[in-house]
Amino acid sequence: MAEHDEGWFDQLFRAHATAVHRYFVRRAPSEAEDLAAEVLTLAWRRRDDVPDGAELPWLYRSAGYVLANHRRKKSALLLEQLPETPDDADPADAAVTDDVVRRTLAGLSERDREILLLHAWEGMTGEELAAVLGITRSGADAALSRARSRLAHAWAEA
Amino acid sequence: MTDHEKSEDLALDRLRAADPAVGSGVDLTRLRAVVDARIAAEAGGDGLAPVTDLTHAPSRRSRWLRVAAAAAGAVVIGAAGFGLGKVTPGNDGGRDQGGAAVSTVPQGEAADSAAGSTAALDESRMSYPGSWSHTVFRAVGLPSDAGTATTWAFDATGAFTAERVAEVAAALGIEGEPALVDGSWQVGTTDGTGAYLLVYPDGQAGMNFYDPAADPWNCQVGDSGKDAVECPRSDLGTAPGDDEARQLTRGLLGELGLDPDAFEYEVSKDEGAGWISVAANQVLDGNRTGTAWWASFTGAGLQSLSGSLATLVELGDYPVVGAEEAVSRITDPRFGTLNAYSILAAENVRDTAVAESGVAEGTAIAPVPSTDPPVPPAAGAAVPWPVEDVAITSAELGVAQYTTPDGAALLVPAWVLSADDGRSWTVLALAADVLDMAP
C-alpha cells in the first residue's frame, strides 16, 4: 500500500470533502461543516485504515458514527432537561421540505431510513453499500430490498 | 433495476428529488482550514503528526505544524513526545528549536474532552481495529487462566457450485438451470416475470430468493410509468400468523439441509401490508454468531428468503488468552476492539445515552452552548486532561465474525468485556501464537 501521507490526504480531500459535507447537509444541516471536519480529521488520524479504492464508503461509514455520536450528545442534553425520552423524529426530516416525503420517512424504522437515504441520496448500492453498512454484500442487497418494499408501503400510507 | 421494482421506483424517485443537498455548496477552503487546525491541535498530543525532521530542514515542515505555529498562543513542546523535552513559551521559538508546535485546542475538542468517555467510546467503534485515547481499563475480579476455544470458518466453496444452487432452487420451487451472471449464480429471471434465486461469491455464500407473485407491491406499471401515481396493493389474503411463520421457516431451513434447531427465531410483521418476517439467528454453543436467515411471507406464500449457504467448518481448538489479558488488549495497538457495532444499531445509541447519563454523575455532559467564549485556565495551572477509568467487571467468552483480508469469513473466539453500567467491548481471544501478524 502506498504511503498515506499528506499528498494522499490532499487528494482525498479534493475528491471527497464535498460528498462528506453533503452527507451532513442532508442529516444535520446546521452542524454540517463541523461534522464534516470531524470525519476528515478522523480520516487523517486513521489514515492507515482507509482502504485504497474504497475511500468514500469508509468516509460515509465514519460519518455515520460521527452523526450517531453527535445525536447522542444532543439527546443526552435533552435528557438533562426533560424527563421524557426524546421523540423518534429524525433530524433529517427538518432538512426535507417535501411534506409527503417527510411523512413517508417518518413511517419507517431508523435502520430502513438510513439504508434508503444512503441509496437514494448518496447513491450507494451493492459492494459500496455493504462496505458503508459493515455487512456482507448479500446482506446489504437483502436489507435494501426489504427497505424499498417498506418504503413503497409507507409511501402509500403517507 | 428489475421491472417488478417499478412500483418502488416511484417512491424512490420522489425521495431522490427531495434531496436537501441539491444546490448546496460548501466553502472548501474554510472547511480545509478547520480540518487543518484540528489535525495540528492533535499533532502534539498523540504523536500522530506526519514525521518531519524539524532540526535540519524547516522548509519540509508539514503544513499542519505550519498551521499550528501560526496560531496565536502556540505552546512549544519537545519533539520527543507530548510532555517530554523542553517547554518554551510563545511565538516562533519552536521553529528554530526543533519542537513540535501545538496550538490551543479548539472549542469543539475541549467539549469532547469534557464529555470524556463518550468521545473515546465512539471513536474506538469507528474503525477496525479500534484504538483508544483518554481511557484506561482495569480488570476487576476476572479469571486469569487461559484455555482453548473452537475457531470456525465459513466454507463457501461447497455452496458456490451449480449442483448446490440447483438443489436450493429445487427446494424453493424455481425452475431452470443455474447460470453464472456477473460472477453470481442465478436461477430464474430477474425481470419480474417469475421467482429467482441469486447466490453470491462472498465468504458466506450469501443467497437471495424473491418471488414477485407473493409480493403485494408487485404491480406492473404501464408504458407511461410516470402517469401511474397509484400502485394499488394486491390483496394476497392473510399472511401466516407468528407460529405458522416460524414453522414455515424451520421447514425451509430443513429443506435446505440446515438444522432448524441451530437457530433462534424472531418474528416481525406489518399487519397492514399483509406480510410477516422471521429472522432465524444462528446459534453456536449458546451464543449468537451474528449470522441470520431472513424469510418473509404473505398470503401467497414465501415472498423472499436470504441467508448464508456456507457451512461452518471447525478449524480446531485454539489457545485463547484469559479475560484479564483480554482487558489489556483493548488498548493494545495490535488488537483494539472487534467491531460489533453498526450504524444500523442507531437505536442502541439512545439506550446507552440513558445508561451513561445516569452513570456519569461526576462527568459533565457536554456543556450547554453559551454565547461567551470559554475562560482560559490560570497561568501555571495544570491542563485539564480527563482520563476515564473503566472497571471491567464481567467477561464472557463467545464468538465474533471476522473477515480476513482476502474475504474469508471466520467465527473467532472473542471475549465480551463489560463494565457495571452495561457498556461492553469485544476483543479477540485467540492467543498470539496462532495469529499471523505479517502485514
Image (cartoon, rainbow, N blue to C red):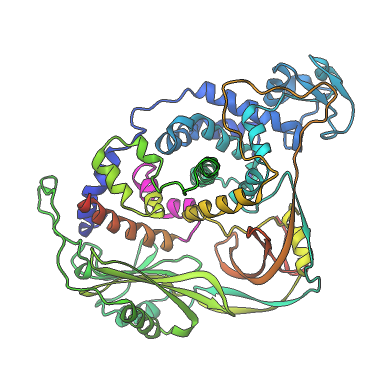
**Residue, x 81% and y 74% (percent of image)?**
B145
- Report the magenta stretch's main SS: helix
Q: Is residue B127 visible?
A: no
Q: x and y percent of residue B331 in the render?
A: 74, 53
Tell me where residue B142 appears, x and y as whole percent: 77, 68
Question: Residue placed at 70% from the left, 48% from the top?
Answer: B132
Q: Is residue B133 left or right of residue A153?
A: right
Residue for point 53% across, 77% down: B283
In this rendering, the answer to whether B35 lies above or below B152 is: above
Residue B150 is left or right of residue B44, and the answer is left
x and y, in percent, of residue B181 in the image:
34, 64
Q: Is residue B235 above or below residue A127?
A: below
Q: Seen from this angle, which residue lies furthest front?
A: A83
**Is residue B111 visible to the viewer in this orientation of the structure?**
yes
Instruction: Report the quarter where the C terminus of chain B lies.
Output: bottom right
> Of all residues shown, which one is farthest toward the right?
B86
Foreground pick, B10 / B55: B10
Query: Residue B67 sits in which quadrant?
Result: top right
Q: Position of residue B286 (x, y in %)?
A: 58, 79
**Which of the pair B350/A140 is nearer the observer?**
B350
Q: Which quadrant is the N terminus of chain B positioned in? A: bottom left
> In the image, which residues are magenta?
A116-136
The correct choice, above or below, for B30 with respect to B157 in the image is above
Q: Residue at x 63, y 41 (%)?
A: A47
Count every numbered label the image shows and give the total: 0
Q: Is residue B150 magenta?
A: no
Camera-nearest residue between A62 and B162: A62
